[in-house]
Image (cartoon, helix red, strand yellow):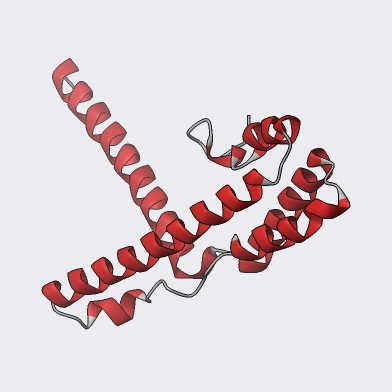
Amino acid sequence: MSNIRKLIIVGLAGASLGLGAIAVNASAGHRCHEGGFNKEKSAERMQQRQARLHDQLKLGAEQEPAWKAFTEKMKPAGGDRPKHAELAGLKAPERMERMAAMMQQREGRMAERVAAVKEFYAVLTPAQQQVFDANFMTRHRGGKGHAK
């Protein structure tokens, strides 16, 4: 067998392995949106993060009502993601309208959360604000969803 044929065969084999890995990753991501997301585990992690932040802030008794209001307003909305089958039955313009409506709902929810953070932040001392700044939403830093 000539060297060119060997190189072609090796190249095709490598390409097929690469495409197989891409297909596996794509299907794994698809399963995540179809029910692989564990709401209970996510809620548990959120409660753990909140408890850790609460402890680090060393809140006074007069700040506790603001903390309770803040954590209540920061709870996930949940349930606004439609099923793939639900969207598949719609025409393209209808799907886009649904997506735009969901974006508007999320934008409104984000505005509510911004207000909640501002309200809570206002009752913190400067030292507590530094702790809050360093620890709030740390899971979004670093590009991989892990705290640094």
- The percent position of residue 139, horizontal first and vertical second, equals 59, 41
User: Residue visible at 70% across and 54% down?
Assistant: 45
Position of 32 relative to 95 (above/below): above
Left or right of 130 on screen, residue 22: left
Q: State the quadrant of the C terminus.
A: top right
Residue at figure coordinates x 21%, y 22% from the top left: 7
- In this rendered view, identify the residue nearer to me: 108 or 145: 108
| Residue 26 shown left or right of residue 71 in the figure | left
**Count of labels in the image:** 0
Q: Residue at x 80, y 39 (%)?
A: 56
Q: Position of residue 27 (x, y in %)?
A: 39, 57
Viewport quadrant of the N terminus: top left
Q: Is residue 77 above or below residue 110?
A: below
Residue 29, position as x, y percentages in the image: 42, 55
Is 103 placed above or below 114 here?
below
Q: Nearer the viewer, residue 142 or 113?
A: 113
Please name whichever residue, 133 or 37, is drawn nearer the observer in this view of the structure.
133
Q: How far across and down, in percent of the image, does residue 16 sit?
A: 28, 41
Query: Which residue corresponds to the image point at 52% horizontal and 69% vertical from the top-left?
Result: 77
Q: Quadrant of residue 19?
A: top left
